[in-house]
Image (cartoon, helix red, strand yellow):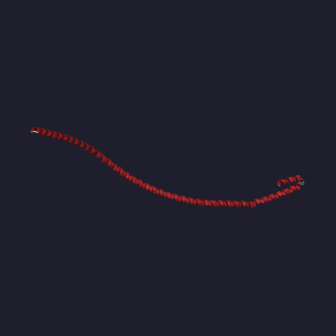
Amino acid sequence: MNGEALLYVMASAVVVSAVALILQALLLLGVYKASKATHQQVTVITARAVSFLETTGKSIEQSRKQLTEVAVKTSEVLDLTRTQLVRIDDFLGETTLRGRIQMDRVEMVVDDAVSGLYATAALLNKGILRPVREINAVAAGVQAALASLFRGQRLSVERATHDDEMFI
């Protein structure tokens, strides 16, 4: 190859290299602009994300406090409920015991009243009704005797037999 051809080859290689360098510079400029736009977007998103994270952190902290308060109050309510249930259980046990005692007393009173009623009925029967029946029987006997005496006529055999058959 001669000197002139070599010069043309070298010149064309320099031109190709220069064009490649210019293209590279343009591409780097495009990458710079794209990264700058991305950086701006990331900065805006980062500011929003930081604000969101701060708000979320505050909300979580408030929720934690509220949950702690709710847990404490729930524990207090459960303790109070246990205490009240123990009291109610004691009250029901005592009431049941007293009710049984009162039922026993009522049963004794009713038994005494019934015994007294039976004793009174027996005494009434012995002391009043029996003598009244006896007096009634004596009066009926006296009446029958007087009727028989004053009537004067005797019962016919037919009539006497008929009266006796009624009792047989």
- x and y percent of residue 14 in the render? 14, 40
Quadrant, the N terminus: top left
On the picture, is 5 further left or further right than 138? left
Q: Report the residue at 50% width, 57% height from top.
A: 85
- x and y percent of residue 138 in the render? 82, 59
| Residue at the extreme left of the image, as rendered | 3
- x and y percent of residue 78 in the render? 46, 56
On the picture, is 135 further left or further right than 109? right
- x and y percent of residue 44 in the render? 28, 44
Q: Nearer the viewer, residue 138 or 163?
A: 163
| Residue at the extreme right of the image, as rendered | 153
Quadrant, the C terminus: bottom right
Query: Residue 77's image quarter?
Result: bottom left
Query: Residue 6's image quarter?
Result: top left
On the picture, is 14 further left or further right than 69? left
Task: Give the number of callouts.
Answer: 0
Q: Nearer the viewer, residue 128 or 115?
A: 115
Q: Report the residue at 88% width, 55% height from top.
A: 150
Q: Nearer the viewer, residue 1 or 163?
A: 1
| Vertical comparison of 47 with 98: above or below | above
Q: Report the residue at 54% width, 59% height from top.
A: 93
Q: Report the residue at 44% width, 56% height from top.
A: 76
